[in-house]
Amino acid sequence: MEEIDVVVIGAGQAGLSSAYFLRRFGFEPVVLDAADGPGGAWRHRSPTLTMDKVHGIFDLPGVHREPDVDGSRPAAEVVPGYYADYEDRAGLRVLRPVRVSAVLPGERLTVVSGAGEWAARAVVNATGTWTRPYWPYYPGARDFRGRQLHYASYRGPAEFAGRRVVVVGGGHSAAHVLSELAGVAASTLWVTRGLPDFRDGEFGEQARREAVALVEERVRAGLPPRSVVSVTGLGHTPVVRDALAKGVLERVPMFERITAYGVAWADGRHHDADVIMWATGFRSALDHLAPLRLREPGGGIKVNGTRAVREPRLQLVGYGPSASTIGANRAGRAAATEVRRLLLRAPETRPVLTGGSAGTPAA
């Protein structure tokens, strides 16, 4: 077992941001990543999600890079390359593939994996959500004779040519699928629980902060976090504009049940379908934290900033308000600041280093 000051679990945007700021503050974290290569969740995105459809992915802190990338290139290719370069230039120690099975309480937090164990004075958890796609239950789902899949498995429109597709979900993932299936699928039907919340104007820094604050209210109360997009609404991104132009963002209310050949509503209406695409979001991947007993009666984990209230040695990033490109970098800095404050108070404290390849400590 290796004794270490800080372990970061996960090497997506939030994890790399946390590790960068920890180095700036003089610590040398080890970053454990379950994937077999850099890129976080981006490496698993559909090859049809091109660079001209995404934003905010070149915003990792401290290492400048000009986003001079061909917009037609898949994000699943570009972003892993960017992350790999960032890990190298920022001097981060990333071990992969290392899947963490448990974090155990004790004098130190013991991080357990198939590749070894680490006894850490602090842990930053940045495991995100991509590995836990959310499939809501509706009566009759097992009887459906067509195909059901989650957006996490979507790899482009070609395989749905000539099919009748029901797309469930009110976010940008649903808009992405609908925009690409237009003119390829025999038909599409967009189904959402609530009315879509289209937002005009630029989504600037102030709007981002307000969106993050709304999600943060829930995690401070120990409630399961809502997605950031649930409070930002559907902005007029390139994907949304494309879907609107093609006329496929005509929403109908949520169906009541699934039948063998489609979906049905309480008033007797039925829609025939070959495919049901669940663009219904993700849940936080936190099973490995179960031994710490962090859950509140409301079902969530109470978090103050990034610090888990029930276990102050644990920082949660990529959770709640930082589970998107909007809040990940700010959460990384906040988590590193909390770790520095914790470890400088602890008996084992050693001086915070200055200088080095990761830069000088921030104020």
Image (cartoon, helix red, strand yellow):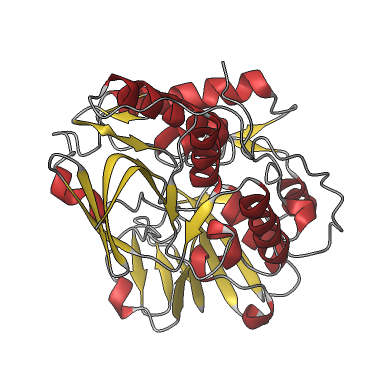
Please tell me which residue is depicted at 71% across the width and 67% down the height of the picture: 48
| Along the line of sight, the residue nearer the viewer: 44 or 143 | 44
- Compared to 345, does 122 lie above or below? below
**Percent x, y of residue 154:** 56, 70
**Percent x, y of residue 113:** 28, 64
- Compared to 353, does 54 lie above or below? below
Residue 299 visible in the snapshot: yes
Please tell me which residue is depicted at 45% across the width and 82% down the height of the picture: 146
**Percent x, y of residue 44:** 56, 67
Say which quadrant the N terminus sits in. bottom left
Q: Looking at the image, how many numbered discs can be counted on the residues? A: 0
Using the rendered view, name the quadrant where residue 349 is placed. top left
- Compared to 114, does 81 lie above or below? above
Please tell me which residue is depicted at 14% across the width and 49% down the height of the picture: 291
| Along the line of sight, the residue nearer the viewer: 87 or 180 | 87
Position of residue 67 in the picture relative to residue 84 (left or right):
right
Residue 228 visible in the snapshot: no
Position of residue 262 in the picture relative to residue 185 (left or right):
left
Position of residue 70 in the picture relative to residue 247 (left or right):
right
Give the residue furthest to the top. Answer: 363
Position of residue 114 in the picture relative to residue 94 (left or right):
left
**Percent x, y of residue 358:** 61, 38
Using the rendered view, name the quadrant where residue 363 is placed. top right
